[in-house]
Amino acid sequence: MAIVIFSKLLTETDISVRLTVPTRALQHINMPAGDNNVYLSPEDSEGREWPFRCYTRLNGHPRPAFTTGWLDFVEAKELQIGDRVTFSMLEDEGVAGGAPQYRIRATRTITLFREEHVVDLPQRNSSNSAEIQEDHGDGYAGSAATTAKATRRAAEEQEGFRRPLLSPPPHPPAPQRLFVLLLSLQPVTVSSPQIQCYHHHRLLGSQLSWMSC
């Protein structure tokens, strides 16, 4: 069973500088006595470990934060402002006094077919990136349900992007265009047929040859 240490929506500082951590999370992090930093190796939803340096201030408010290694995680998951990061710890009653096993999960809420879904963010260019796990509220791992293709489609819908259902009809062939042009011509009322033919020839240019009237 996993104990959620903290869960937060990412801010601009979180994705560009460091991840600020709630102070209450320090009670679940084994900080060495007399020291103000420790390396943690949480495991993501794909089973990869990410080494983070948890840093606190020695004097005043501790203001804990994940510094070294955090931006590598941000880049690999392509995290954005508003994404959620959940940091948790596994309970293992069989190993008393053992090192805590941490878990980190990055998720994003998308709208698909007018319904909101929370999906895990896989590592970029990962072999598992073709499938994204959807959270149904029943645990850490979730169940495989939403594909990356569906995620991209949902993102396009959110941005108002719509592909045309039918491609525009092609231009009519040259003879058909010529016929339409002929129909659009207004005949000139003249007494001489030769002058009327000359009038049509000038309007159509080189597309018509002289013809006898």
Image: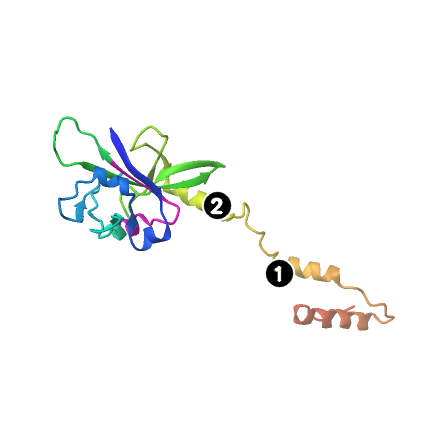
State the residue in front, 53 or 127: 53
The residue sitting at the top extreme is: 94
For the N terminus, the quadrant is: top left
Quadrant for residue 183, please give it.
Answer: bottom right
**Residue beneath the point at 46% across and 38% down:** 112
> Residue at 46% across / 40% down in the picture?
111
What residue appears at the point 22 percent right and 51 percent down from the top-left corner? 59
Q: How many marks?
A: 2
The residue type indicated by label 1 comes to Ala
Residue identifier under label 2: 158
Q: Secondary structure at mark 2?
A: helix
Q: Amino acid at mark 2?
A: Gln
Residue 78 colored magenta? yes
Q: Is residue 163 above or below residue 142?
A: below
Residue tagged 1: 174
Q: Secondary structure at mark 1?
A: helix
Question: Which quadrant holds the C terminus?
Answer: bottom right
Task: Give whichever of 156, 11 is nearer the camera.
Answer: 11
Give the x, y percent position of residue 195. 81, 73
Q: Is residue 192 magenta?
A: no
Residue 129 image offset from top left, x and y in percent: 31, 43
At 17% across and 36% down in the image, what residue appears?
100
Residue 47 vs residue 171, the one in the foreground: 47
